Image (cartoon, rainbow, N blue to C red):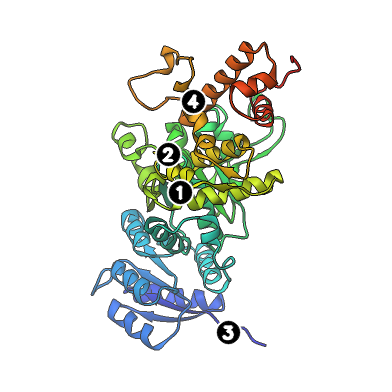
Amino acid sequence: MTTQQPHILLVDDEVDLCMLLQMSLKRMGMRCDTAHTVAQAKQLLQTHTYQVCLTDLNLPDQDGIQLVQYISEHYPTLPVAVLTAYGNMELAISALKSGAFDFVSKPIDAASLKQLLDKALVNTTQPHVEKGIEHRLLIGESDSIQALRCTIQKVARTQAPVFITGESGTGKEVVAKLIHQLSHRKDAAFIAINCGAIPAELIESELFGHKKGSFTGANQDKLGLIQSADGGSLFLDEVAELPLSMQVKLLRAVQEKKIRPVGTDHEIPVDFRIISATHQNLEKLVQNGEFRQDLFFRLHVMNIRLPPLRDRGQDILLLADHFMQKICTAWNIPPKQFSLQAKQWLLQQPYLGNVRELHNMIERAITLCDSNIIEQDNLSTMLMPQTTSQTVEPEAQSSSKFPEEGLEIYLESVEKKIIIEALEQTHWNRTMAAKKLKMSFRSLRYRLKKFGLDTDKD
């Protein structure tokens, strides 16, 4: 049985270049038709079936980006890669935003061209992940979530860098992982990095790797996280936290797809798709000189903004039910239900911590609830520290109404203080403390263990 040759459409007004590329593609086992104008390309598209289209951006009759837009609208499954002259990065990025799969710079390197075409062909022939995964991982039926699913599906088909914005806790990593799983890279690694969690002195080694002996403590060669994402996707969460010195090196890695581990004098080619995210206003950071403008434009090709939970309506109850089922299954306890009052209360909350806050809220409610029905009191008890006699210290107050350390950390600190106060008032008799706090002994014991207060004092 013979395998059908891939059929490529090449659109470029340079006749000599077309002839050279035709010969290169023939050696790669591919058929190639050529067009020198957008009009000729449209005629060929109507009479032939192609697996990949390669187009220049500067064409005599129309802009090449218009051809990209035309193909995206009329032939959405056909990947389009653009040919761009050196230094014409802005046009290449515009093409990616218009629906191009990827781009390759002129003069064209045969190895780079083959790698690009291989990825494009895999994208058209390889089956995607199981149908409906975007509904399973991205829960909700609001208009904003349905629009988000459509955007993710379109973005996943390209190689363009993706920039995700949204408040803390809206699910940026969930969306990044979904983009990866819907792409042709799904069988390779998805590497997630929280840029704010890595100490500044270690971040270069973590990202790029190092050679044994390159610095004190480097006792063996280390593979960097970027290289670990070879063939897959690299997710940089809170990318705004990267030091300026690291932003320069990241820019080169993204542009050239090459990295240089610490302590080496040679570069290593790495094929990765970059997805980045932050809850900060990156445009303002660029204006203030705290983030490089060139890196911003390189990362900010396909922009996805996640809606806050408070704007998602009935999605709140869908998520609450999902979390309840998931937690009860994990804890091996019978599933519970929300009372009507509890549901109404859930729909009225501001959710400054968004989906993450809701998850933690449901976890607390399940712990506090001794029956099969979760009531409003189970949800709201730990969110109302003002009902106790304890006052918040002055340093916890600020000119902002939002806690500087983040809502979840603040709430946990308040919860811990209330529990300690109850224990001290009952001379650390946990049974009496549980009654004082109007919670079950099991719920109190869970929290004592969580906060490291599980002693044998009573």
CA gap between label 2 and label 1 equals: 10 Å
Residue 410 marker: 4
At 32% from the left and 78% from the top, the residue drawn is: 36
Disc 3 target residue: 4
Among the two numbered marks 4 and 3 on one chain, the one whose residue lies closer to the N terminus = 3
Label 3: which secondary element:
loop
Q: Label 1: which residue? A: 316
Residue 244: name its quadrant: top left
Horizontally, residue 18 falls left or right of residue 117, namely left
In percent of width and height, residue 281 lies at 34, 38
Q: Which mark is residue 412?
A: none
| Nearer to us: label 1 or label 4 | 1
Within 10 Å of the Cα at label 4, are there few (<14), some (14-19), or many (20+) other Cα atoms? Answer: some
Q: Which of marks 3 and 1 is nearer the N terminus?
A: 3
Residue type (three-letter) at the residue carrying disc 2: Tyr
Report the amino acid beneath label 1.
Ile
Front label number (4 vs 3): 4
Task: Give the label, 3 or 1, closer to the camera.
Answer: 1
Residue 271 appears anywhere in the view: yes
